[in-house]
């Protein structure tokens, strides 16, 4: 009996929600592509540039370490026949240590880049959401949806307010400076 009531209640709720959506004034519904706003805003582009600089610096450091490993590996291969077993073992251990250090550096660099990207993205998205609220209130919107891939299969371009959000966000950042 309780299951039937739950099913009936759920069906009524879903139908009322769907009918409420159909009753919305389409001019008061907007769609924002947050990914696009993040990447096309001036702050987002600056963050992307900063992140690319960090990535390049980490890559150059890792390439240098990789060259050192390859050099040691080549030396070991050339000298393998003439080295004493003890010297050969010492060079192999040094090579293994350098490889472990390299792998640790790669892991640390990836973690640092991911952390920095998260920090930058989180701050910008928080500010973009405030801007979206402001644009929605100014424009009298009753519903703003995020145009995320797979969630909204189609929306008319006339309700896309992404450009307006980017413009207002960039203006607000200039005013703060």
Image (cartoon, grey):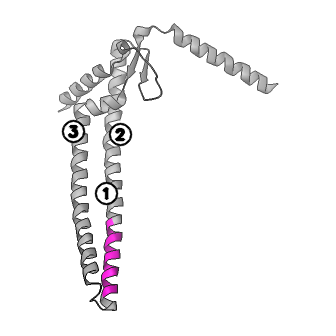
- Which secondary structure is most common in the magenta stretch? helix
Is 29 in front, or is 150? 150
Is 133 in front, or is 167? 167
User: Disc 3 on helix, strand or loop?
Assistant: helix
Q: Does residue 132 lie above or below 55 as drawn?
A: above
Instruction: Tell me which segment is drawn in magenta.
Output: 88-102
**Residue 54 within the magenta-colored segment of the rendering:** no
Is 89 in front, or is 40? 89
Q: CA distance from mark 3 to mark 1?
A: 20 Å
Q: CA distance from mark 2 to mark 1?
A: 20 Å
Name the residue beneath numbered marker 3: 46
Say whether disc 3 or disc 2 marks the residue closer to the N-terminus. Answer: 3
Q: Residue at x 68, y 18 (%)?
A: 11
Q: Residue at x 46, y 23 (%)?
A: 152
User: Disc 1 on helix, strand or loop?
Assistant: helix
Q: Are marks 3 and 2 in contact (CB under 8 Å)?
A: no
User: Disc 2 on helix, strand or loop?
Assistant: helix
Residue 33 picture location, percent across and down:
36, 26
């Amino acid at each position: 009996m309780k299951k039937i009531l739950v099913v009936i209640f759920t069906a009524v709720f879903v139908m009322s929600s769907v009918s409420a959506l159909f009753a919305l004034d389409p001019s008061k519904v907007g769609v924002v592509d947050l990914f696009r706003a993040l990447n096309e805003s001036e702050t987002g582009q600056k963050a992307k540039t900063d992140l690319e600089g960090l990535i390049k610096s980490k890559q150059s450091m890792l390439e240098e370490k990789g060259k050192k490993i390859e050099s040691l590996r080549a030396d070991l291969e050339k000298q393998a026949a003439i080295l004493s077993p003890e010297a050969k073992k010492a060079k192999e251990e040094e090579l293994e240590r350098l490889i472990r250090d390299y792998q640790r550096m790669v892991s640390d660099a990836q973690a640092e880049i991911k952390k920095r990207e998260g920090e930058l993205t989180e701050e910008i998205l928080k500010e973009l959401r405030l801007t979206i609220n402001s644009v929605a209130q100014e424009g009298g919107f009753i519903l703003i949806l995020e145009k995320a891939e797979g969630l909204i299969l189609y929306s008319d371009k006339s309700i896309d307010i992404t450009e307006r959000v980017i413009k207002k966000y960039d203006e607000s950042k200039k005013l703060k400076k």
